[in-house]
């Protein structure tokens, strides 16, 4: 039984850490984590991949023991996942989707929370098995690809994995950010419209 201590880590780090550990060594994992969202998220993630989860209260947190798992899940990406044993996509596979990100925040709540959620979303894209074909940034979304952005490095990594990262040229000019673009390239509204209309699916944030 291996131990993994993710106490003190914020979303999405606990789930990402557990995912990597399970892919590296399969089941038989004891996870030490904080109560609340980390415990709920890791439990949901593990059960969704067919693992049995046993909870043990600890001082200031919980220990989750993960055993079993769907057939073929042990040993890394490309195994089976989910309670029904459906095959997981190979890591880095394309899902045919296009992301349209029109803000540097996610949702309509407090600005600080919205920026944190958007940061976490983009960082999490580095860990999901399927990647979008391309990501378009428009309006204040282009600030995410500019120098000084917390996610510029993550976007550059996505680009290195084959995801097209493109920012609206008019928007970059408006915010005077074209010269400081740190990730991806520049595009125009015609290309954005053409891509959105031809995509298998479009996700707008």
Image (cartoon, rainbow, N blue to C red):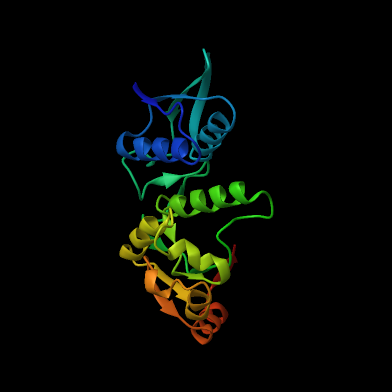
Identify the residue at horizontal 38%, vertical 30% (top origin). Answer: 27
- Asked if residue 6 lies left or right of residue 56, the reply is left
Query: Compared with residue 174, is residue 154 higher up or lower down, i.e. above or below?
Result: above
Numbered disc total: 0
Query: Compared with residue 15, is residue 140 higher up or lower down, i.e. above or below?
Result: below
Which quadrant would residue 196 be assigned to in this image? bottom right
Residue sitting nearer the eye, 63 or 108: 108
Residue sitting nearer the eye, 147 or 120: 147
Residue sitting nearer the eye, 182 or 26: 182
Note whether residue 90 is visible: no
Residue closest to the far front: 176
Image x and y of residue 89, in percent: 41, 56
Residue sitting nearer the eye, 130 or 117: 117
Image x and y of residue 141, in percent: 53, 65
Residue closest to the far bottom: 190
Which part of the image, by quadrant, shows the C terminus?
Answer: bottom right
Which part of the image, by quadrant, shows the N terminus?
Answer: top left
Image x and y of residue 37, in percent: 58, 33
Image x and y of residue 70, in percent: 44, 38
Note whether residue 103 is visible: yes
Identify the residue at horizontal 44%, vertical 35% (top origin). Answer: 69
Identify the residue at horizontal 34%, vertical 59% (top origin). Answer: 157
Residue closest to the far top: 59
């Amino acid at each position: 039984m291996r131990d993994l201590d993710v106490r003190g880590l914020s979303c999405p780090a606990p789930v990402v850490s557990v995912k990597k550990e399970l892919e590296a060594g399969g089941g038989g994992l004891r996870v030490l984590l904080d109560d609340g969202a980390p415990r709920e998220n890791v439990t949901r993630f593990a059960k969704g991949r067919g693992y049995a989860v046993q909870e043990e209260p600890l001082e200031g947190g919980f220990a989750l023991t993960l055993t079993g798992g769907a057939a073929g899940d042990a040993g890394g990406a490309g195994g089976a996942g989910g309670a029904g044993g459906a095959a997981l996509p190979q890591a880095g596979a394309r899902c045919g989707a296009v992301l349209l990100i029109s803000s540097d925040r996610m949702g309509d709540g407090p600005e600080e929370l919205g920026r944190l959620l958007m940061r976490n979303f983009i960082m999490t894209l580095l860990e999901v098995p399927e990647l979008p074909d391309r990501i378009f940034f428009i309006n204040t979304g282009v600030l995410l690809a500019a120098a000084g952005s917390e996610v510029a490095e993550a976007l550059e990594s996505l680009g290195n994995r084959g995801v097209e990262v493109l920012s609206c040229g008019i928007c970059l000019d408006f915010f005077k950010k074209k010269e400081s673009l740190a990730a991806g390239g520049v595009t125009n509204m015609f290309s954005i419209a053409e891509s959105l209309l031809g995509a298998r699916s479009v996700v707008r944030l």
